[in-house]
Image (spheres, grey):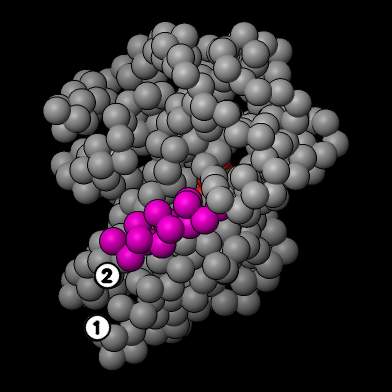
Amino acid sequence: MKISRRLAMLGGASLFAACERQHSRPLYSSDTHPEEYPTVQAVKEMGRLLRERTNGELDIKIFAGGQLGSERDTLEITTFGGLDMNRVFLAPLNAIEPLTTIPSLPFLFQSTEHMRASLDGAPGEAILRSLEPHGLVGLCFYDSGERSFYNVGREILTPDDMNGMKIRVPNSDLNVAMIRALGADATPMSLSEVYQSLVQGVIDGAENNWPSYESGRHFEAAPYYSLTRHVMTPEILLMSKTRWSKLSLEQQQVVRQSAKDSVPFMRRLWDQRVAEARDRLIAAGVKVNEVSDLAPFVELMRPVWEQFVVTDDQKRLVREIEELAA
Ligand code: GTR
């Protein structure tokens, strides 16, 4: 595991020692996205609610822009208590807890409303709760929208167009399997490495939502964006169990409630950001295409469901989510 210098410094100087000394210091939280991104703004809003509701006793200090390292690394550090809070994509948690793979199944959610209802309801609660044995407290989910493929050289209309393409995926076996199922090569890496890898030709493409495609400037190197909308994996906000257990029951309740209350705020920002990013990128000359026949993508990717949905708990979760589509 690579630990960023910043995190090592924080760890040495304050994180570990301070945990014991001063329970009153802010909760330190990490995010790979820059300051103005909706996930960062949402955690900021949560911090505002915490200050207001505890008379300043609880607060959050956010380290944005990946200052503390990649999601995989900061996640590991959060599980052993070296970092208090972390806003990450759900995929890097797949290696830790099997239930987290479910919202990343291809073509599972029928719409944004279906995704939101599932994560706001019992399935979402089950996933949040499942993290406690792993040293993590799941606080809430944030939207990450629909992900589609982008690449350096051509429109994708059928899976054949992706044959042999090297596609970057987040660090998760499920994401690797989805790409292989389409006949492409999967290269797992963290988000911060994608831009350089596209420029240097290490990969031909990747997949993400409009805001990340824009924010990481991936569109400059990979201007073909093909709307497969194959997954709607959400973001998750986590707290380390170590810091959590030092809070009073009352404080824990305020933290949970404030996280939940930041969700509608995030969704407003998110919807706006998706529309703005799309408009700006189209104006900037990105070659966007609809994929009119998704059936071959659905058919090729469907076997990963059987491969990754194996436990009874996972199967129950899939059923519950499917029922919510009705
Ligand atoms: C983004 C997400 C990030 C990051 C990224 C990825 O949409 O907001 O947290 O995980 O996707 O593809 O790795």
Amino acid carrying label 2: it is Ser
The residue stretch that appears in magenta: 264-277
Q: Secondary structure at mark 1?
A: helix
Q: Residue 99 location in percent, x, y?
A: 32, 33
Q: Quadrant of ligand 1?
A: top right
- In which quadrant of the rendered view does residue 186 lie? top right
Q: Is residue 252 visible?
A: no
**View extreme (front): residue:** 283
65 lies left or right of 46 = right
Decide if residue 139 is on the left or right side of residue 4. Answer: left
Quadrant in which the C terminus appears: top left
Neighbor class of circle 2 (other Cα within 10 Å; few <14, some 14-19, many 20+) is many
The first of marks 1 and 2 along the sequence is 1
Q: Does the CB distance between marks 1 and 2 fall below 8 Å?
A: yes
Q: Quickly name the residue at label 1.
A: 53
Q: Is mark 2 within 8 Å of ligand 1?
A: no
x and y percent of residue 2 in the render?
A: 69, 49
Vertical order, 299 against 70 (above or below): above
Please say if 305 is above or below 100: above
The residue tagged 2 is 258
Where on the picture, by quarter, is residue 64?
bottom right
The image quadrant where one finds the N terminus is top right
Q: Is residue 81 left or right of residue 97?
A: right
The image shows a total of numbered marks equal to 2
The residue that appears at 68% across and 67% down in the rendered structure is 6
Tell me the element at label 2.
helix
